Amino acid sequence: MRLNLIELLYGGAGRNFTPKNGSTARLEQTFSIFHPCFWEQGRSKAPLKTPLNTAGEYPIYMRQLQRRHILLFRILRDHCLFLTRRQSQRVLTLPTNSMNKELKWLVSEKYLARRYRADTFGHFQTPVYYLGTLGWHSVGNLVDDYKEYRLQILRRAERQVDHTLAIYDVFLKIIMESTVKRIIGGEDKLWQEAIEFGNVPDGWIQFNANGAFIEVDQGSERPIVLKRKFDKYIKFKDSGAYSNLFPEQAFKVLVFMTTEERIESMQQVTASDDIWFCTMGEFLKEPLDHAHWFALRGFYALPSIGKKEVSELR
């Protein structure tokens, strides 16, 4: 075998080539200068690469989807139209440097797509991420429905984005730290059909045997406006309409406010112990079962919060 290779290298196939004594060893020695590992290792292997990836640009584990990717896609399909990089990082649980590469890979492979927000001082060229064509299809959606889904995101008014993202902060915290059975967003048709309610909440979440309305305040509504909203919640409960709509579910309204001072101002207009207040910063920082909810009769913690395994999310 070695002799044949030497013939090809120095003489070519079909030519008469008879090395003299000792010449074979000299040729092998000369050949090893150019390929020192040729005899032991065989031909070197080129690194694998996908059509959209430059070899070595992304870690190997990122070249196929993992469970955490599917979880992110399901959250975007079922509960959140779009998420920021920081919010996506809560789901993928990666350090910042790895997260940036991961998002770049997911976008390049069309699992995710980006919408850049309108340029302002607060978020100059800041993207939000939503399902790309491949991500949309990978979680069971019809390809023909993607165009309508994408237009819904692109047409979302910029003035609504901050409030929407704040609601998604709440959803993600509860999804990642408890066993969520059901989430009904504020845009669900259910709230228009519940004529006797009169409110359009930011969401309703069922976890274990507990149900809670979500209200995210960004400091723009006057206390008197919030009072009317809270009065409608209590009327909805006392009339029995809530128990008809959500049988055997406890009633609670979780209100997320900007500052403790604003919570203190709400003490003057709240007359029910079923309306709980917390600052958004405190809620996101502390464990989900932390006793930081202020209500009419004191401080409370969310009851019966079960630690969730990510694989249980359906």
Image: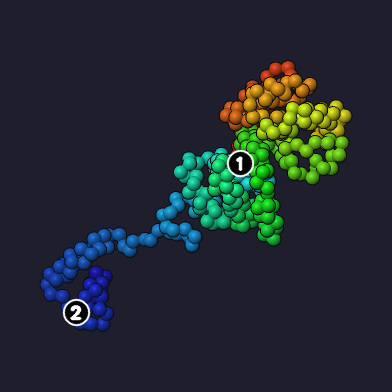
Q: Residue at x 74, y 41 (%)?
A: 186
Q: Residue at x 31, y 62 (%)?
A: 42
Residue 277 location (% of width, % of height): 69, 25
Q: Is residue 172 above or below residue 65?
A: above
Q: Residue furthest top?
A: 297
Residue 210 location (% of width, % of height): 73, 30
**Which mark is first along the chain, 2 or 1?**
2
Q: Residue furthest left?
A: 21
Q: Would you say residue 289 is visible in this rendering?
A: no
The crowding category of the residue bearing disc 1, from other C-alpha atoms within 10 Å (few below 14, some 14 to 19, many at least 20), is few
In three-dimensional space, the C-alpha distance between marks 1 and 2, rounded to whole angstroms, equals 68 Å
Q: Is residue 233 above or below residue 116?
A: above
Amino acid type, callout 2: Phe
Can you say which quadrant of the picture contains the C terminus? top right
Q: Residue furthest front?
A: 121
Count of marks, rendered view: 2
Instruction: Give the image quarter of residue 220.
Output: top right
Q: Would you say residue 153 is visible in this rendering?
A: yes
The residue pinned by badge 2 equals 17
Q: Residue at x 22, y 78 (%)?
A: 11
Amino acid type, callout 1: Ser
Q: Is residue 159 above or below residue 257?
A: below
The residue pinned by badge 1 equals 311
Q: Residue at x 54, y 48 (%)?
A: 125
Residue 215 location (% of width, % of height): 71, 33
Residue 272 location (% of width, % of height): 78, 22
